Amino acid sequence: MTDDVAARATAGFRSAYGEPPAGRWAAPGRANLIGEHTDYNDGFVLPFALPLRTVVAAAPQPGDTWTVCSELTGETVTFGADELAGPGRVDGWGAYVAGVVWALREAGHAAPGARLAIASDVPLGAGLSSSAALEAAVLAALVDLGGLDLPAERRPRLAQRAENDYVGAPTGIMDQSAVIRCRAGHALFLDCRDESVEQVPFDLDAAGLAVLVVDSRAPHRHADGEYAARRGSCERAAGLLGVAALRDVPADALADALARLDEDETRRRVRHVVTENQRVLDTVALLRAGRVREIGPLLTASHASMRDDFEITVPEIDTAVEAALGAGALGARMTGGGFGGCVLALVDAERADAVAAAVTAAYAERGFAAPGHVTVLPGPGATRLD
């Protein structure tokens, strides 16, 4: 997939600027294997990088000017020092590029002027971190073009600041960490409190397995307001329980914690976060031991918790999970913030097409728009291609 996207980025650069780029940089979309709504509770997540990529072809440009074109819109955006004086002065997709330059400058780095062309096969609006992929690819290009001293472990926080403070999107650290720091054949075990990471073996190919990613094509319903409501509920519950964050409620103390809460809805929100953190830890333990096939029930339990306790799924998502399990998936769950997005199903590689067909048939039976799907193995994080 990357070869085709890279070729399109090069073609876009040549068309826009009349010469070849100085290099090409790629960053992946990501899927979260398990650990949903645990990030802002100082908990644990386990994402992996997808083979779907955003590629930036780039070359230096004199002065403090940046020009960027996108194959998606056919637009070209140019911005300079005036637009980087503060957030909000570049909007639309160009804000993600300007945000990276702004964040670099705010951190004291002399971001070089550049011409850039963007191509991508990371779907927009599917919860696979297309924005983080764009930020990471642009960041990698500018770091290399400018010879900047910015090691990989410091890049996620800078990319997150671009999205939070310049674009104005309240993302956590998981997306940027995953698209920058993931390795092929591994999942990234991230502690969202101290941002420490561990590369956990996730060699699906050796186990004869694959992950089927189903794009539900469900429109996101009230996602922003509901996300804020879930986050607020968790923060209030932590206050009532006298802990800094729900991560500090251990699984073996959950029953006592729930007994101290008066509202059933709050109890259910807390139960999801505490049990989800434990499911991440249990999944990591199985992967460390090479017992990949055994993580399936944990994925399915995660989905049930998101559906029943956190209440963030929609009918299209639940239908995809049920159909995948009925067709023999070892486990399946929604991935992402909820109210739409994608489903992951852990499948025997040879059964991936059959499971996808079963989901498509279930959608047709329910009258839903046909889903999209792709079969994936864990890929690498952001990298220079040439």
Image (cartoon, grey):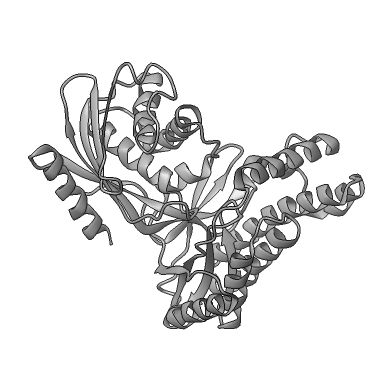
Residue 203 picture location, percent across and down: 43, 67
Q: Is residue 34 left or right of residue 61?
A: right
From the viewer's side, name the closer residue of 56 and 182: 56
At horizontal 52% and vertical 44% (from top left) the residue drawn is 174
From the viewer's side, name the closer residue of 254 and 286: 254
Quarter of the image where the N terminus is located: bottom left
Q: In this view, does 358 lie to the left or right of 39?
A: left
Residue 325 picture location, percent across and down: 60, 78
Does residue 266 sit above or below 219 in this rendering?
above
Q: In this view, does 32 lie to the left or right of 12?
A: right
Residue 368 picture location, percent across and down: 55, 70
Q: Which residue lies furthest to the left in this view?
A: 19
Q: How many marks?
A: 0
- Is residue 253 at all visible to an observer of this figure? no
Does residue 107 sit above or below 325 in this rendering?
above
Res 306 quadrant in image: bottom right
At horizontal 49% and vertical 67% (from top left) the residue drawn is 214
Res 146 quadrant in image: top left
- Is residue 100 at all visible to an observer of this figure? yes
From the viewer's side, name the closer residue of 140 and 226: 226
Residue 46 picture location, percent across and down: 54, 54
At horizontal 37% and vertical 52% (from top left) the residue drawn is 28
At horizontal 21% and vertical 30% (from top left) the residue drawn is 114
From the viewer's side, name the closer residue of 282 and 237: 237
